Image (spheres, helix red, strand yellow):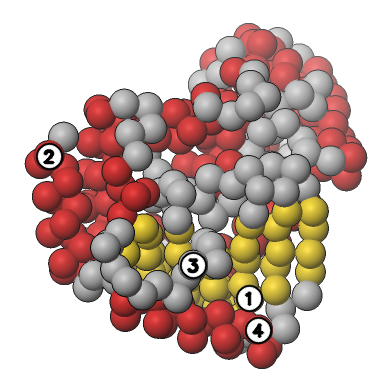
Amino acid sequence: MTTENESAAGDGGGADWAGGQAPDKSGQGVVAAFGQSLKTLRVRAGMQREELGKRLGYSASTIASFEQGRRIPPPRAIDQADEALRADGLLTVWKDQVEQAQYPVFFQGMAQLEKQAIELLMYDTHVVNGLLQTEEYMRALLAMRRPLLDQETIEQRVAARLARQDIFERRPAPLLSFVMDEAVLRHRYGGKDVLRAQLEQLLLVGHKRNVEVQVMPVECEDNAGVNGPFTVATRKDGKKFVYAETQNSSTLETDPEQTVLAAARYGIIRSQALTPRESLEYTEKLLGEL
């Protein structure tokens, strides 16, 4: 079992940890080294920050943040910079390492599993899972964090979280199952308009053929998920992993016995919740009440 302890409150499948300024010394080193390479290649090309920024769709100050290691560029920006500076792969070779540096050490394993998984089973009890969140919902959650996050960190985390949602466009499509407590759909984080858009997002994603969204009603007398939220990830080789987060720690469980038991527990939770069809109808009902 791999266990990492950090002081961070989760907000849905590691969602609040996805992104931000480089989270640890190793991550800072990678981002700083990439930034120095970017600056060296830009200067060699005789290009000002303003010009490179225009080509990449960023301001000169953002380019400076990339070069100084204060902000992590998304993969698309790295590809564009490599092409604009005619770097012949000297920048794109950093892409995987820089992307991993978006996440604290304790979430990097789960971030990789999301990309490799053929199946993800997710149970959430407090907020909408990060893979399902709208941008406005993300911003509402991040704005509520204490201590307060600076705006640059919020922007980075939003960008990173949205990038994780590419999983819905991946081919072959992984099987994705979400079960969430009814209370998750009733919390008006950010206000009625934010919740309304979030419920509409759930309905949209819930109609995808590879996705099942289920609701656990508050009046349900039995719930095998009383111990809290968790995710079971299955790779193509059949190996299962269990990711769980609490107020002050997160765990990535690899023991075969525990992962099989977690998958079985999820199956019970799924059977106790409303069916996917009933859940979509219930979500539509809640949407109509707003």
Q: Position of residue 258 (x, y in %)?
A: 65, 84
| Mark 4 or 1: the one toward you | 4
From the image, tell me which residue sits under label 4: 258
Question: Under tag 3, what secondary structure?
Answer: loop
Residue 173 visible in the picture = no
Q: Position of residue 130 (x, y in %)?
A: 47, 49
Gap in Å between the C-alphas at discs 3 and 1?
A: 20 Å
Q: Nearer the viewer, residue 29 or 127?
A: 127
Q: Are marks 3 and 4 in contact (CB under 8 Å)?
A: no
Question: How far apart in space, not on screen, are marks 4 and 2 (Cα)?
Answer: 41 Å
Q: Point out the tag, 3 or 4, that comes first from the N-terminus.
A: 3
Element type at marker 1? strand
* C-alpha span from label 3 to label 4: 17 Å
Mark carried by residue 289: 2
Q: Quadrant of residue 135?
A: top left
Q: Nearer the viewer, residue 162 or 184?
A: 184
Label 1, on which residue? 241
Q: Which residue is mark 3?
A: 226
- Name which of mark 4 and mark 2 comes first in the sequence: 4
Q: Identify which amino acid the numbered label 1 is placed on.
A: Phe
Marked residue nearer the N-terminal end (1 or 2):
1
Label 3 Cα crowd, 10 Å radius (few <14 / some 14-19 / many 20+) = few
Callout 4 touching callout 1 (CB < 8 Å) = no
| Residue 103 in the figure: left or right of residue 156 | right
Type of amino acid under label 3: Val
Q: Residue at x 63, y 57 (%)?
A: 245
- Out of 144 and 25, give the one closest to the viewer: 144
How far separated are the C-alphas under marks 2 and 3? 28 Å
Q: Residue at x 72, y 31 (%)?
A: 21
